[in-house]
Amino acid sequence: MNFEILKSESFEVKNWTGGTSTQLFIYPKTADYLSRNFEFRLSTANVLVEKSDFTILPEVYRQLMILDGQISLKHDNQKPKILKKFDISKFEGRWKTTSIGTCTDFNLMTTNSIIGNLANASIPKNKNTDYLLNKANQWQFIYVYKGVLKISLENQDLQLNTGDLLVFKTPEDRALSLKAVENCELVFANIPSN
């Protein structure tokens, strides 16, 4: 099975007008966020100012999950929506979007009619949970927002620490056993096959 662990120290943190952003993964790897030539992109952001306007991203579909904090998100002329921990908002990047409040969030951006999905899990220390890999997906990701996670895979014991990302390309149907060495908060992202 084709997989890799991307370590937290390998990610580049960039400043933006509202705080900081960390790109976790972009596809294709030669793509550049500023050039908007990606098919999909995973990132986290720390929103440090009370009010911020999102960058307008035509042709991009966005999904945003709150990891910590709380914000009020308003798109164009729609009613504001309050987002708390692990709540998800799905919206078009071309919409004028404003957030009020501070938070840490996880972002999935997709283009070219790709629609991925996000989910989360909290696993108490020394507990296990199953995670299903599905060959209907082209990509699957496990992001460790907090904690230490152990996974047995391909006769290897893998350890993921806070901020690490486990990447599966063209996964096979299989259940993985995830064990929390410390209390874990995880984000799962899936990109379906075309």
Image (cartoon, rainbow, N blue to C red):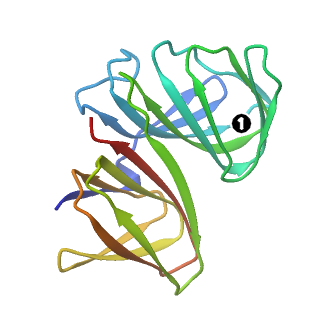
Inspect the image, locate mark 1, and give the three-letter code of the amino acid beneath it: Leu
* Numbered-mark total: 1
Residue 45: x %, y % from top left? 58, 39
Residue at 53 percent of width and 85 percent of height: 127
The answer to whether residue 177 is visible is: yes
Judged from this view, the residue extending furthest toward the bottom is 126
Say if 115 sits above or below 132 in the image. Answer: above
For the N terminus, the image quarter is: bottom left
| Residue marked by disc 1 | 48
Q: Can you say whether 44 is above or below 133 in the image?
A: above
* Quadrant placement of the C terminus: top left
Q: Regarding mark 1 in the picture, which secondary structure is present there?
A: loop
In terms of depth relative to the viewer, which is nearer, 129 or 35? Answer: 129
Q: Residues within 10 Å of mark 1 (few under 14, many from 20)?
A: some
The correct choice, above or below, for 175 with respect to 86 in the image is below
Q: In the image, residue 140 lies at what x, y percent?
A: 34, 52
Q: Residue at x 67, y 27 (%)?
A: 18
Residue at 43%, 40% in the rendered image:
116
Instruction: Tell me: 86 left or right of 28.
Output: right
The residue closer to the viewer here, 163 or 59, is 59
Residue 129 in the image, given as x and y percentages of width and height: 48, 77
Q: Left or right of 142: which side holds 122?
A: right
Residue 101 in view of the camera? no
Q: What residue sits 56% from the left and 83% below the top?
A: 125
Residue 24 in which image quadrant? top left
Query: Which of 100 and 65 lies nearest the eye of the viewer?
Result: 65
In-image side of 95 versus 79 (left or right)? left
Q: Left or right of 9: which side holds 4?
A: left
Q: Position of residue 38 (x, y in %)?
A: 33, 24
